[in-house]
Image: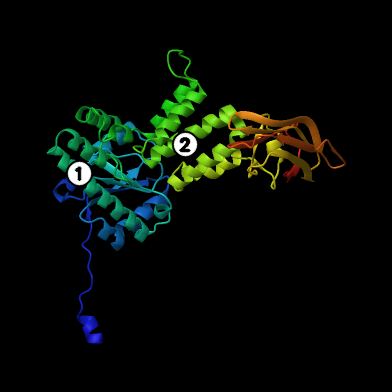
Amino acid sequence: MIALATAMPAVVHAAPQIAETYEAAQPLLQDDGYILFAYAEDWDTYSKKVCDKLIASSAVQQAAGNAVFMRVPIPNILTDERKEADKARYGSLKIPDSNNYPALLLLTRQGRHYATITGPYMTKAMPKKVAGLIKEAMQAMRKQEALLAQSNSAEGVEKARLLGEAALIPGINPPEAPWKTINQIKKLDPKNETGYARRLIPPFDLSVEISTIEREKDTNKPHGWQEAIKRAEEYLKDPVYTNEQRQALLAVYIGILSRNKGLAAAAKIRELAHEITRLGPDTDLGKTVPTILRDWGLGVTLSEGWTPETTAVKEPVEIESIPSFSKAGTYTFTLVRDSGNHNGIVSAISLYDGDKLIAEDRHEGFVGPTKNQNNVYKLEVTTPPTNPHLFIQFNQKPKYYNSWGHIELTTP
């Protein structure tokens, strides 16, 4: 066993091809292009140490294939002299910006920036994790390059499809600015058979389109927040849009509801927020969902009741987890104080069937630390609703009033 082990050759990784300048990199370049190790020069010495560790890592070297490594120090202040020095050093390479350093900037052999690797795996100098990200990005790049090569010999709708697929490869940048690809696809696919002319619209641009409808004042154009929601819902029903686009549409939809209906739309806001999570919890928008639910999706349930935040809202607040109201008769709601230094004041409880008001008890009642007054509300339901929505109207004056309570329901 010992002899066999000593006879087996050790795994040897080829040393990385490291170039200090663009000119030196040219004879070394192969299909895997460049990996630029960008770090903060002088103003963050740790980031340089991270890059040196990753360059020396066998895991990173193996994942990088035949890519050429280049160190890219980023100065704190870019002087004219430094610009000239960088121009001489990097030649025709355009060094991409990064939000954070250290960063790995991955470029194709032609110098096209297709991916940036930053984040905790970089800052914590975790070579195996970084190597995995490099491998994934390179695999995506090769797939993208293959689609682009196929598109060169294709025409019409087929060429549009290949360009669209290449632009939407996940995990890496599109080959060019989206609007350029969209314009090209529109010419190749005037009937939009592939759908890529819409799928390539940046999510932010879709948000702007919907928001513009909300703010539009031109009477000759559809405008208003209801019209904006209508357009957002139309787009959300269309299967052509990507998950990222859908998240952007859902986010702007939530914003419109919050601005125009407040907590009266809390139930719908929660529904839309959970859909954002389903589409991608780890995206930038997916990570905002807890904040959305905290600030805009705060509703009232019968058992959990109200809080100071809900009682301060001027609009009616929808009550969740309601009964089906499947029977005609009297439904009695009793306000019950749980805690707080002030009265919980209510002016109405209303039942709607869709948008139609079918029962309401409107009077001021309260529950407080020392006494309760008129704290029972009764709804006379003659025709059971098919789409019930129950609202409570608080009449709290100062926002600093604190009152917690719940609602007890007696059904017929």
Find disc 1 in the rendering and name its residue.
147
374 left or right, relative to 172: right
Of 137 and 393, the residue lying toward us: 393
- Is residue 296 in view from this perspective? no
Dot 2 falls on a residue whose secondary structure is helix
Q: What numbered label is drawn on residue 250?
A: 2
320 left or right, relative to 147: right
Which residue: 58% across, 37% down?
386
Type of amino acid at the residue the image marks with label 2: Leu
Count residues near mark 2 (Cα–Cα under 10 Å), then give few for <14, some for 14-19, many for 20+: many
* Disc nearer the start of the sequence (1/2): 1
Is 405 situated above or below 400? below
Of 207 and 300, the residue lying toward us: 300
Of 73 and 208, the residue lying toward us: 208
In the current view of this chain or complex, which residue is farthest to the left? 153
Dot 1 falls on a residue whose secondary structure is helix
Rendered location of residue 196, percent (x, y): 28, 35
Rendered location of residue 17, percent (x, y): 21, 55
- Is residue 327 in view from this perspective? yes
Type of amino acid at the residue the image marks with label 1: Leu
> Where's the N terminus, which quadrant?
bottom left
Rendered location of residue 402, percent (x, y): 76, 39
Which residue: 72% across, 35% down?
379
How many numbered discs?
2
> Where's the C terminus, which quadrant?
top right
In the current view of this chain or complex, which residue is farthest to the top? 219
Which residue: 22% across, 60% down?
15
Count residues near mark 1 (Cα–Cα under 10 Å), then give few for <14, some for 14-19, many for 20+: many
Of 355 and 142, the residue lying toward us: 355
Mark 1 and mark 2: Cα distance apart in space = 31 Å
